[in-house]
Amino acid sequence: MITLLSSLALAAAPLPQGERLPPPDFGDKEVIAVVDALFATLEKGDGPALLQLVYPQGRVTARGTLRSGFTGLRSQSFAEYAAAMKLGSGFHEQISDMIVERDGDVAMVWAPFTVSIGGKVASCGTDHFDFVREDGVWKVMNLTFSSRTEGCGA
């Protein structure tokens, strides 16, 4: 009986503290910072600020149903997109479950999103950003996204 109690006492003893390792740094924070800054420019409707974060000749491509009611494929350069932006439109995009992949000076981000206009859910889908780093600066080369207006939650 004493042997059983000794075994139970040993089994309940806490494990020794292990050494904490820092999380790996794959440079994802730099890419994510560009995504965050891009959304801030979209929320403000600031086209000139957007053009500082992207390659103007890059593309914004949507496939699906847009909040405007358009269904199909729409693609335009970032320069065209920025020129059409409007200040104070009430636009807000929330992404979740972001996946970042990098290889040298090329990266991509894949993330589900929900867009709200004036606090009301307008559309949802998945964003795909591709990035190129030039002279140490990450910029968005292209943004491609799926879009739907149904099944987006509250």
Image (cartoon, grey):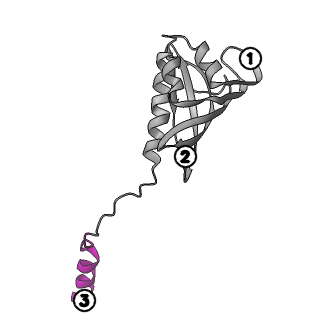
Q: Residue at x 57, y 41 (%)?
A: 131
Image position, residue 57 (x, y; %): 65, 29
Reading the chain from its start, which is encountered first: label 3 or label 2?
Answer: 3
Q: Secondary structure at mark 2?
A: strand
User: Mark 1 near mark 2, Cβ–Cβ under 8 Å?
Assistant: no
Which mark is nearer the camera, 3 or 1? 1
> x and y percent of residue 49 in the render?
48, 22
The residue tagged 2 is 99
Question: Earlier along the polypeptide chain: callout 1 or callout 2?
Answer: 1
Segment tinted magenta in the rendering = 1-17
Which structural element holds mark 3? helix
- Type of the residue with mark 1: Phe
Say whether residue 13 is magenta.
Answer: yes
Amino acid found under the numbered disc labelled 2: Ile
**Measured from the top left, where is residue 29 in percent x and y?**
43, 45
How far is mark 1 from mark 2, CA to CA? Answer: 28 Å
Q: Are marks 3 and 1 in contact (CB under 8 Å)?
A: no
Dot 1 falls on a residue whose secondary structure is: loop
Residue identified by numbered label 3: 3
- In the rendered image, residue 16 lying in the magenta stretch gets the answer yes
Lower sequence index among marks 3 and 1:
3
In front of the other: 131 or 95: 131
Indicate the position of residue 120 as horizontal and vertical percent values. 53, 16
Work out whether residue 53 or residue 114 is closer to the camera in this orientation and state it: 53
Real-space Cα distance between discs 3 and 2?
52 Å
Tag shown at residue 70: 1
Q: Amino acid at mark 3?
A: Thr
